[in-house]
Image (cartoon, rainbow, N blue to C red):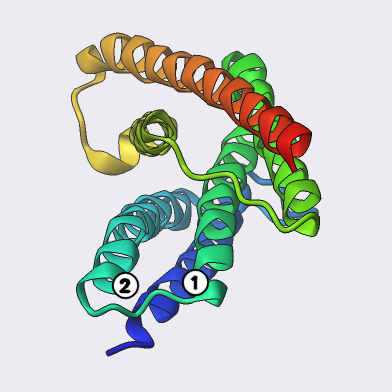
Amino acid sequence: MRALPNILTGSRLVLALFVFAALAADAGAIPGWRPELALGEALIRGALAAFVVAAVTDFFDGWLARRYQATSVWGAILDPIADKVLVCATLVGLLAGGGVALTIPAGLILMREFAVSGLREVVAARGLKLPVTWLAKWKTTLQLVALAALIVLFGWPAFGLPQSWTPVWAEASLSLLWLAAVVTLITGAQYFAQARTALRTN
C-alpha cells in the first residue's frame, strides 16, 4: 500500500504519453498515416478516458500518501513532474489538431511551466524548497477541467453531442483555458517572488 501513491503518479506519466499519442494520431500528425473516421473517433474517446483517469490519480496519489503516511522524496519529486507532463502533452496534442485559437494561452502555460520547473531546480540545488500554494492547486484544477473540455470539443462527433451545443461549448472551453493561463501566470509570479525571498535570506 505504501508504494501505491508512487505507482499512481507513475501511471499518470504513462497515461500522458498515451493522451499525446492519441491526439496527435487523430490529428494526422504521424507522417504517411491518417486514421479512418472510426479509428479517429476511438482515439479521441480513448484520449479523453485516459486524461480523466490521469487527472483523478492527481488527487488520489497525494491523498493516499497522506492517509497511509507513505510520503517520500521520490513521490514529492515525481508528482509535480507528472502534473506538468500531463498538461503539456495534452496541450501539444491539441495544438497538433490545428487548435490555432489555443496558441496564445497554451504558449503562456507551457512557458510558465518550464520556467517554474527550472526555478525549482535552481532553488533545490541550494537546499531550498518552494511550497505549493493554494492558488497553484486551483491552477492545476482549472487546467485539467479546461483541457478535458477541449478534448471533447476537438472530438465532438465522437461523443454524439448535439451540434447546436458546439458554439457555446467552444466559447466556454476556450474561456476556461484563458482563465487557467492567467492563474498559471499569477502563480508563476508568486513562485519567483518566493524564490527571490528564499535566496536572499539563505
Front one among 159 and 74:
74
- The answer to whether residue 75 shows anywhere in this view is yes
SS under mark 2: helix
SS under mark 1: helix
**Above/below status of 169 relative to 64:** above
Q: Earlier in the sequence, mark 2 or mark 1?
A: 2
Quadrant holding the C terminus: top right
**Above/below status of 139 relative to 173:** below
Q: Provide the residue designation for mark 1.
A: 75
For the residues labelled 2 and 1, say whether their Cβ atoms are less than 8 Å apart. yes
**Above/below status of 174 relative to 70:** above
Q: Provide the residue designation for mark 2.
A: 65
Q: Residue at x 36, y 34 (%)?
A: 134
Q: Could you give the CA–CA distance between mark 2 and mark 1, rounded to whole angstroms?
A: 9 Å
Q: Residue at x 23, y 79 (%)?
A: 68
Q: Residue at x 36, y 57 (%)?
A: 58
Residue count near mark 2 (Cα–Cα under 10 Å), binned few <14, some 14–19, many ≥20: some
Which amino acid, mark 1?
Gly
- Which percent across, then down, holds residue 118? 77, 44
With 80 as the anchor, is 41 left or right in this view? left
